Structures are given as structure tokens and as C-alpha cells.
Amino acid sequence: MMRWLARAFALLATLGMALAAPQRASAPLFGMATSSGAAGTSLSVPMQIVILLTMLTVLPAVVMSITPFLRIVVVLHFLRQALGTQATPSNQVLIGLSLFLTILIMSPVATEMYHKGWEPMEKNELAFAPAFDAGAQPLKTFLIRFAREKDISLFLEVTHAPAPRNPNDVDLKVLIPAYILSELKAGFQIGAVLFLPFMVIDLVVASVTLSIGMIQLPPVMISAPFKILLFVLVDGWNLVLGSLMKSFYT
């Protein structure tokens, strides 16, 4: 986390120095010009700031959609429903846990994207378009690992896009929705498996309470302590989160 903050401050400092440095601009458009460097024409600092602010605006959707955050938060939601603990842990806790696990998993990918895309553009070695393509390659490699071929074929058919010669030729506009569908399916599959042992406890408790005529309390209220006790005894948080983390490293 500290390394990410340091890089953010470095980017801001770089933008500040670029504002102070004289640039050779050409063809200003809406007050935003392009500057010429060793690698050819590149974006001016105002345009870079606009792009940066735009990226920060869509950052929450990006984090929730094209990272492991999607699968993790879906599984944790199903786990809480299976335990029957209502709002415990709270949504803030589940989202915070999912976010930090996502940062842990995506750190190598983000670092590679930074070195391949942002640094060359910052040094005027690449223009924006080649830098974007180079920086997006590590993300595409990550998404391809978990996107199902069936989902990719679906969006290729919907968009009438030509079939790619190899996985690296799949466009991001096709790969991202395919990845989201694949992660939703994986999250629901894991959630269904988590529900089974707790559903068995609910069935046993409901059968026992009905057989002895105990109708004063709902069976769910009686089974909740047993489900929590079972989850604690088997060290459920370690098992669930450990399995989730390992599923992204295999």
C-alpha cells in the first residue's frame, strides 16, 4: 500500500514538474495541445490531467468489474447469507476485506502495467496509443486466464468481431464482459457449495424442533449458533479466504 501511495505522489510530482517545464505545443484543441518529443507527438499535460481525472471517475467500476474483487465480494456475500448472521460482518467490512485482497492479488499486474505503459510515456519514449497497448497487455493476460472460452465466443458473436488468431488478439471490449460473466459464474458456484453444509444444519434443526413440537422459536434462530460454532471450529475464514486466494494463483 505504501508503495502504491509513493507512486501516486511520484505521478503528481511529475505532472507538477511538467507544468513548470516549457513545452513545444502544436494545434491546440479546446485549450489542450499535443507536444513533440523524442518518440513523436505526445499528449500535453492538461490533456493528461483530464485523462487522469476521467480514469479516477471510472476507477470504482474498474476495480469492481475487472479484478478479483468481483468474485471475492460475491462469495463473501453468499457466506454471510449461509451463516444467517444478517448484517454481520457489515458491508463495509466485506468490501474493505475484498478490496485489500484484490490489491494483494493485482499488485504484480499493476506494477507490470506501470513499467510497460506509464513509464515509457512519461519518458517520451512512447506516444499515448502505443503506451496504452503495452500497458494493457499484462491486464489482458490476467483476464484471459479466468475468462471462459464460451463467454468470449458469445461476445465475439454479438459484436460480429472476427475470430482472433490467438488469445492475445482478443479485444478488451470483448474480453472484459466475458471475464465478468466468468467471475459471476465462479462466484455463484463457490457460494452454492458454501450453502450446502449450513443448509444441512438448518434441515436437521428444523426436523428436530418440529418433531418435539417446539414452535415458539423459528428454526433459523435456533440453528444460527450451531452454524457459527461449526464455522469457527473449522477455522472457516482461513479456509474460505485461503481457497479464494489460491484460486487466482494457480
Image (spheres, rainbow, N blue to C red):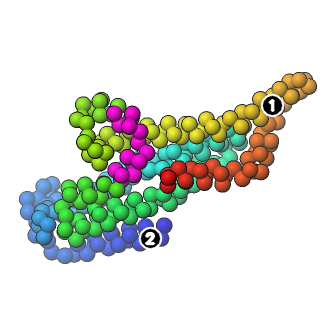
Amino acid type at mark 2: Arg
Q: Is residue 187 above or below residue 121?
A: above
Residue 3 is tagged as 2
Dot 1 amino acid type: Val
Q: Which residue is mark 1?
A: 204
Indicate left or right for 206 with 199 as reference.
right
The reply to whether the magenta stretch includes residue 18 is no
Toward the viewer: 114 or 144? 144
Residue 195 at x, y = what percent?
66, 36
Other-residue count near label 2 (Cα within 10 Å), few / some / many at <14 / 14–19 / ≥20: few
Location of residue 71 in the rendering, given as x and y in whole percent from the top left corner? 51, 45
User: What is the span of residues highlighted in magenta in the rendered image?
Assistant: 139-153
Circle 1 SS class: helix
Report if residue 8 is visible in the image: yes
In this orientation, which residue lies closer to the viewer: 209 or 58? 209
Indicate the secondary structure of the residue bearing disc 2.
helix
Residue at the location (8% across, 63% down)?
A: 26
Image coordinates for residue 148, horizontal then vertical, percent: 41, 39
10 to 56, vertically: above or below: below
Q: Earlier in the sequence, mark 2 or mark 1?
A: 2
The verdict on residue 146 being magenta is yes
Q: Is residue 135 left or right of residue 110?
A: left
